[in-house]
Structures are given as C-alpha cells and as structure tokens.
Image (tube, rainbow, N blue to C red):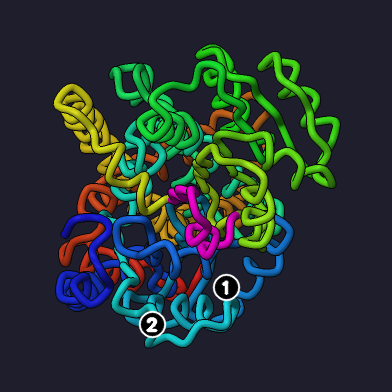
Amino acid sequence: MVPGRRFERARPRARRQDRQGLRARRGDAGSALVSVLVAGLNYKSTPLDLLERFSFDATELAKALHAARASEHVREAVILSTCNRTEVYAVVDGFHSGVGALRQFLSEFHHVAPEDFTDRLYGLYEDEAVTHLFAVASGIDSMVVGEPQILSQVRRAFRTADEEGAVGSTLSALFRQAIRVGRRARAETQIARSASTLAMAGATLARAELDSLEGKTVLVVGAGKMSDLAAVAIAQEGARVLIANRTASRAHIVAERAGGTAVAMADLQTALVDADLVLASTGASQPLITRDMVAAAMEDRVRPLVILDLAVPRDVEPAAAEVDRVTLKDMDDLREAVAPDGEQLREVDRVRDIIGEEVPKFLAWQRTHALAPLLHALQARAEHVRSAELKRAAGLLADLDDREREAVETLTRSMIAKLLHDPMKALKEQAGTAGGEALARALRMLYALPNDEG
C-alpha cells in the first residue's frame, strides 16, 4: 500500500494485520493492544475546496487534540495541519476502531458529514504509518519535493501535542525519530539542495504569466517564513515588494529584509490597485481578499493582475477569478507546476533507502518497549524472591562483616541476572511473533506474574 491511498483501499491489508498480529502484540506487552495509525487528507487525495475545510488554526489545536483523544479507542494523538495536508497520528487499539474514531472526530470538529470525505480519507497502520511520517518529515511527500518548511511543521505539531499532554511514550519516540530522519535525509542526500518553498514555486508560475518580474509591483500578503523567503527572492529579480501582514512589526522585518515596503492591512485595498502580482499566504481562517476588493482595484487600471493564493484555507475568494483581466491561481494550479524532475526523483529514491533503514529501528524499539511491563515484572519477582530468601537466612549471616555481606549481595544479584538473561533475551528476540506470545504466557505462568497493564 502506498501512503496517500484512500481509506477504502487501505482496509484489506490492515484487516490482515489486525487478524494476524492481535495475540502477539497483546501477549508480548502484557497490556491492551495499541498500534500507530495515521488518518488524513492531503493534496494528493483531496481537492482544495474540500481540504481547506479540514484545516486547523493554531489557536484551536489544543481543543482539537483533547477532542481527538476523547474516544476510548485513541490513546495518544498528534495533529499535523499544513497547506498540503491535515493528518492525525494516533496510538489506537485497532485499525477499524481507530479510523472510525478519527473520522468521527474530523467530521464533528469541522462540521463536515462523513459521506462528504470518507472516500478521500486515507488510513495507514503500523509500519506503513511510520514509513509515511518519515517520508513527510523528509520532504518527499510534499507538493514541492524537499521543501524546507515541513520538518519544522512536524516538530511544531509534536511540541504542541506534547505540551497538551496528548502524547505518550509511543508517539514521543516516533516523532523524535521522524525529526532525526528528516535531518538525516537532508544531510545525506541532495533532496533539499534545489528545493523551493511553495511561495517561490508560485512566483515561478507568476513569472510565466507576467513574462518577467522586473519592474513589477508585487504585494505579499502574510509575513511567515514562506512569504519571507519569497519576498527576498522576488526582490532579487528587480520587483518592487510590498508586505502586508496582520502584525505590523513582522511586516516591517520582512520588508527590510527584502528591501521593500510594509503596508498596513487597513491599506490592502490601495495596495491591490498598485500590484501586478499578489502572493497571499497567511493562516487566516476566512478570505482576506474578496471579489469586491479585486473588482474595485481593477476599475481604474488596464494592467492585468495575477493573484497566487497559496493558503489553506484560501486567502482569496475564488469568485475573484471572475473579474476581467484577473488571473487567479491556487494550490490546485500549483500542483501541476511543481512536478519533480529526474534529478529530484533520484534523490527521492535515496531518501526512501534511508527511510527503509530507519523504520525497522522504530519497530524494534516498539517491540522492546511493549515488553517493558513483563520484563519489569519478571525482574521484580526475582528480586522479591532474592530479598525474601536473604531475610530468611539472616540468622545464619549474622556474623558476617560488612565486606562479606556485600559479597553475598553481589553474588545473589549476579545469580539472578544470569538466570534471567536467557529467557529475557529469547523474549526480546521473539517479540511480535507467535513464539514470543507463547514464551510470554509461559513466563507469566511459571513465575506467577500479573497479566495486566504495567
């Protein structure tokens, strides 16, 4: 199964995994069954007019994380919401129950009927979920392959979930490794060497519409990292750059870097009149530029206006495209303009090789981590027996001095460690298999260990 396929196509493989892996995962961990799942919508599976309805504003992420974890089937959750995707990574008790819970969460939180998006929703489970996150963090699943922003977005999504108490040991380990994989991919391959931001790719699209940016006036709406990089690149091509942003201080910083001029949002209408190109990329939940604003700007001019709306949700009303002499491009248009070339595809293959090395490392950690309650119980049982027997023999050891008592302690601890070494080693080696389950069950029975979580 390829990451990004729709949920309905993802089901058969996951159903087999549920059936084949249930007992082993429950037995080895000595706890409730949990696995990693990602459910989401992205630019590959979903048209922009639907994808933007599932965007999460930064101010509502805390509420959303708690809502996602309200289901009894969801143990941990991280929400990754960018202009390319909305994905919920979760630790769940099974594929179907997990996808059902996350689908219901997305539906209720965004007030979208399940039937309106279920055929676009993809669900990836266990190793495929891990592979997908590593690909996302590495930039090879982005619309602009290798783009630099996604790694910081993954890091920020994890940090927010961690601060809200929405992650436990599994997603914490997974996201920390994903961030390391993203860094490794960029250090060991050329995936990021020629990568541009979406805004810079959009500027390339605009250049095709305007022939050249030299001498043109470009209005950049938004002053985030993507807009910052684009503004500098556009200015280097000889364009006059105007920066409009809700936070005036940030607009001035970006304008200074680009050698441009900061514009108050209150003066956006006037700036539209001057602009040859508008590049909009903010985090606003509603359009900032309406059809009426664009129509008014075009009343007293004959020059065409090109608008690039690179925001999700959109910053510009789609109806603005109906105004004469206005060309409006959005993320759906950009998708066709940023297909990777042969060199980039070769680097993608190199990154996939790295991911192929890293996924087994996480799965091995996950298996060992699942064993922790059983291993701790086994060691605790052995220590209890050792301590009890030493107490029973206290009278026989009364004449020993401190040095001799320490020797007895060391000797008995060493004996216990040697006795436990082979069964613990075998348990780790067979983790996740039917043999591992049988061994775990035998150890519980032989050593009278508890069969509950932790």
Q: Would you name the residue on which mark 1 appears?
A: 68
Q: Is residue 68 visible?
A: yes
Label 2: few (<14), some (14–19) or many (≥20) C-alpha neighbours in 10 Å:
some
In the rendered view of the protein, which quadrant contains the N terminus?
bottom left
Q: In the image, what residue type sits under mark 1?
A: Ala
Q: In the image, what residue type sits under mark 2?
A: Ser
Q: Horizontal and vertical percent for residue 160?
A: 66, 51
Image: 289 above or below 350: below
* Residue at 37% over, 54% down: 332
* Residue at 65% over, 51% down: 299
Q: Calculate the distance from the C-alpha at mark 1 to the C-alpha at mark 2.
A: 13 Å
Image: 81 above or below 74: above
**Secondary structure beneath label 2:** helix
Q: Horizontal and vertical percent for residue 390?
A: 57, 50
Q: Which labelled disc corresponds to residue 428?
A: none
Q: Magenta part of the protein: which range?
A: 316-330
Image: 197 above or below 34: above
Res. 38 image quadrant: bottom left
* Residue at 42% over, 50% down: 331
